[in-house]
Each structure stands twice: as structure tokens, then as C-alpha cells.
Amino acid sequence: MAIVGGGTAGLACANRLLQLLADDPDLMEKLGEVPVAVIEKAKTCGGHNLSGAVMRPGPLQELFPDMTREQWRKERFAFGEVTKESVYLLTSAKTKIKVPIPFVPNFKNHGNEVVSVAALARYQQRQAEDGGAYVLTETSATQLIVQDGRRRRRALG
């Protein structure tokens, strides 16, 4: 199975597939030496990601159920839970207006986690490689090839 893109979504897909394959050793064996491959055009996974975000913790807890939020911080991709939040409208270089949060529902992040998206991708890459994925960096998937009725992507390094 080839996954194009080594960002957090592609790596979450790779890690989940590897978890499912670990529960089915026969299928894992049929898939061969490289059951999951991740093709990433950047020099490293996460190399094209923004530096930070506020993330709901639930999906990451589902993907890595054996990890606590404190372990996320020790792995240095998470930096703490949002406990206080404010939204300001910057009207000029010197003035700001505080916007009440009830009027901006998407900005309610209490309980969410502050993360480095690039560091999270690097962590996910290590987990995927430990699970048996092959991560091919500095390679662009540029073309879809159909051969014998099956679609394949051509990767150019």
C-alpha cells in the first residue's frame, strides 16, 4: 500500500494500517517486505508543515492509546493543554479589541493540546518505520499509472 504524503494525515493512515495489519499476520506476510510505503516530497516528514497548531486530543489518543498526554510532551511534539483563551482583533499596529469567545465558537480550545505539527509528523514517521513502513523522502509522486487494471503512482526522486 502506498500513501502519498508524509504529513500528519498520511502518517496517521500509515500507522493505523500497520496496527490493523499487526492483527492479521497472514495478510501482513502476503503483502511482503514493505506492506506500507509513504512517499514524501520534503527532505523529512513534516518538512512542509506549519510549525504549530491547537489540536483536539481524541484522534491522537485513539491512534496511540498507550500514550498519555504527558508522554506526548516528553516526545516534544506537544506542549500543554489550553487552559485559558482570548481572541483579539488587531485593528492597527498599536490597538486591539478583545472579542468575546461566545461569538467565535471555532476559537474555543479549552482542553485541546498545543502541538508542533512538524514534530508530530516526525514522531509519527518513527512510529510508522518501527511498525514496518518504508518512508521514501525527497520523492514526488507525479503520475498515476494504470497497469493490468490496477492503479499505480510513479514516484520520481
Image: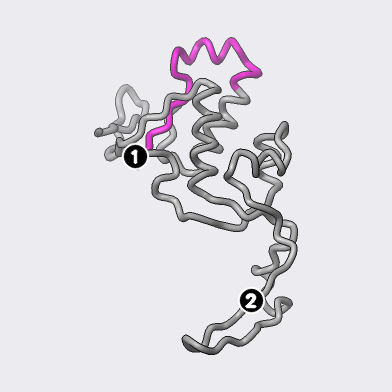
Other-residue count near label 1 (Cα within 10 Å), few / some / many at <14 / 14–19 / ≥20: few
Q: CA distance from mark 2 to mark 1?
A: 35 Å
- What's the residue at 56%, 38% (across, down)? 12
Total count of labels: 2
42 up-or-down from 109: above or below: above
**Residue 34 horizontal side relative to residue 63, left or right:** left
Name the residue carrying label 2: 87
**2 or 1: tag closer to the N-terminus:** 1
Image coords of residue 31 (percent x, y): 48, 15
Image coords of residue 41 (percent x, y): 33, 40
- Which quadrant holds residue 112? bottom right
- What's the residue at 55%, 29% (across, down)? 127
Viewer-proximal residue among 87 and 152: 87
Image coords of residue 123 (percent x, y): 54, 37
- What's the residue at 70%, 76% (across, down)? 101
Other-residue count near label 2 (Cα within 10 Å), few / some / many at <14 / 14–19 / ≥20: some
Check residue 66 for magenta coloring: no
Q: Secondary structure at mark 1?
A: loop
- What's the residue at 49%, 25% (across, down)? 129
Return the mark for residue 43: 1
Say what amino acid the circle numbered 1 marks.
Lys
Check residue 36 for magenta coloring: yes
Say what amino acid the circle numbered 2 marks.
Val
User: Dots 2 and 1: beta carbons under 8 Å?
Assistant: no
- Which quadrant holds residue 114? bottom right
Find the residue positioned furthest to the left. Answer: 156
| Quadrant assignment for the C terminus | top left
67 up-or-down from 36: above or below: below
Residue numbers of the magenta segment: 21-40
Viewer-proximal residue among 156 and 26: 156
**Residue 131 horizontal side relative to residue 44, left or right:** right
